[in-house]
Amino acid sequence: MSAVNDDAAENILRPVPESEAELAFEGALRPQSLGEFVGQTKVRGQLELLLQAAAIQNRTPDHILLAGPPGLGKTTLAMIIAYESGRPLRMSSGPAIQHAGDLAALLSSITPGEVLFIDEIHRMARSAEEMLYLAMEDFRIDIMVGKGAGATSIPLELSPFTLVGATTRSGLLPNPLRDRFGFTAHLEFYDDSELEQVLRRAAVLLGLTIDKRALAEIAGRCRGTPRIANRLLRRVRDYALVHGTDASLPAVNAALDLYDVDALGLDRLDKAVMQILLTRFDGGPVGLNTLAVSVGEEPETIESVVEPFLVRIGLITRTPRGRVATREAWEHFGLAPRGQEALSGNDL
Ligand code: ADP
């Protein structure tokens, strides 16, 4: 595979948006209400109940934690929570909160009843986390003034608010923080029929006529992720436009092949992890850190972005001794199993 193709595959299947244009495109396709939000039936029902109960009691809804891999709808749900409860939304993110002072500035300007969304909440500074505990529990913070022996803390009352935190790594959140959320929603990868619904809805919004077989093909190749489904649909639309064809199955296949999207929707990093696990480590078991170093990525990225999907489609399993390739993985990459007896996803 050429470097150019690698880049193309990485770009189109990347689970996190990077450009302004992409963010605008996502914004246009984002469902605005729970009724429009496809799939995650259980979570939707739980949220609905929580929001209705708060509305009946005329109070701010409980703090909510949304956990799951990128692109599954955490930001969308945060916006929907604000919309459904008729409250203003304020958006921030963990990496933007590097000091307790950043959080104090944010919290002290909150208006009554606001929904505060903190994306990637696990990346917030430790000092801010402690301030957040108190804010979540008592709608109050203590602001430290001065340093050393002369330092004093000034209490500050806050307006009641609902915190919606999103994380790809709920395991990294300290227990005291996790315990202060009234409800944690674990978002799952979407199945093919749900992804077809996401795509059908996006096609209508984009004014694109596309047949059922074409939708099914994209649904099967988008890593169980609505963000990637929408992105692939856009490339198919481009292809149909440039070639003057319908958005039919041949156009989908040609467009996705051009962008190097494989039959399972694996991206460059997925493939790199699998190739190394299979060829360099004979299918494992191999530890997360070793695997991450071998592909030149952070262990966090491998654990929160790459692995969940590979486990979900049964190409790797996590064992106490490390990550192991399954029999299906050897088959998918057209290799003869080596090393220890390969496990089958079905055996587990
Ligand atoms: P996350 O915050 O988990 O990374 P987002 O909420 O930004 O993911 O979702 C990415 C895009 O995927 C959104 O712009 C939206 O168009 C689409 N999307 C996500 N979940 C759904 C859903 N359940 N139904 C329809 N579209 C969805």
Image (cartoon, helix red, strand yellow):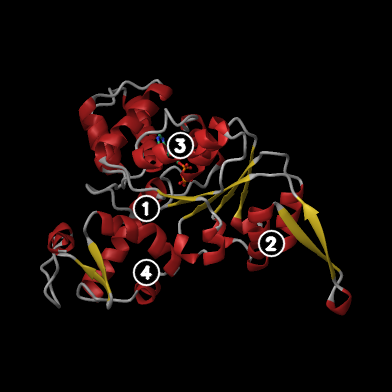
The correct choice, above or below, for 75 with respect to 282 in the image is: above
Residue extending furthest right? Answer: 150
| In this rendering, the label closer to the viewer, 2 or 1 | 2
Are the residues flagged by discs 1 and 4 in contact, CB closer than 8 Å? Answer: no
Instruction: Report ligand 1 position as a quadrant.
Output: top left
Residue 123: % across, % down: 57, 61
| In this rendering, the label closer to the viewer, 3 or 1 | 3
What element does badge 3 sit on?
A: helix
Ligand 1 lies under 8 Å from the Cβ of mark 3: no
What element does badge 2 sit on?
A: helix
Q: Residue under label 1, please give it.
A: 4
In the rendered structure, find residue 49 and report the number of the disc placed on it: 3
Q: Which of marks 3 and 1 is nearer the N terminus?
A: 1
Q: In which quarter of the image is the C terminus?
A: bottom left
Query: Residue at (52%, 60%) from the top-left corner?
Result: 178
Q: Quadrant of residue 288?
A: bottom left
Mark 1 and mark 4: Cα distance apart in space? 18 Å
Mark 2 and mark 1: Cα distance apart in space? 47 Å
Q: Residues within 10 Å of mark 4 (few under 14, many from 20)?
A: some
Q: Quick one: 132 or 124, which is closer to the camera? A: 132
Query: Residue at (46%, 60%) from the top-left corner?
Result: 170
Mark 2 and mark 4: Cα distance apart in space? 37 Å
Tag 4: amino acid? Val
Residue 145: % across, % down: 85, 66
Residue 23: % across, % down: 53, 39
In the rendered structure, find residue 295 and report the number of the disc placed on it: 4
| In this rendering, the label closer to the viewer, 4 or 3 | 3
| In this rendering, the label closer to the viewer, 3 or 2 | 3
Tag 1: amino acid? Val
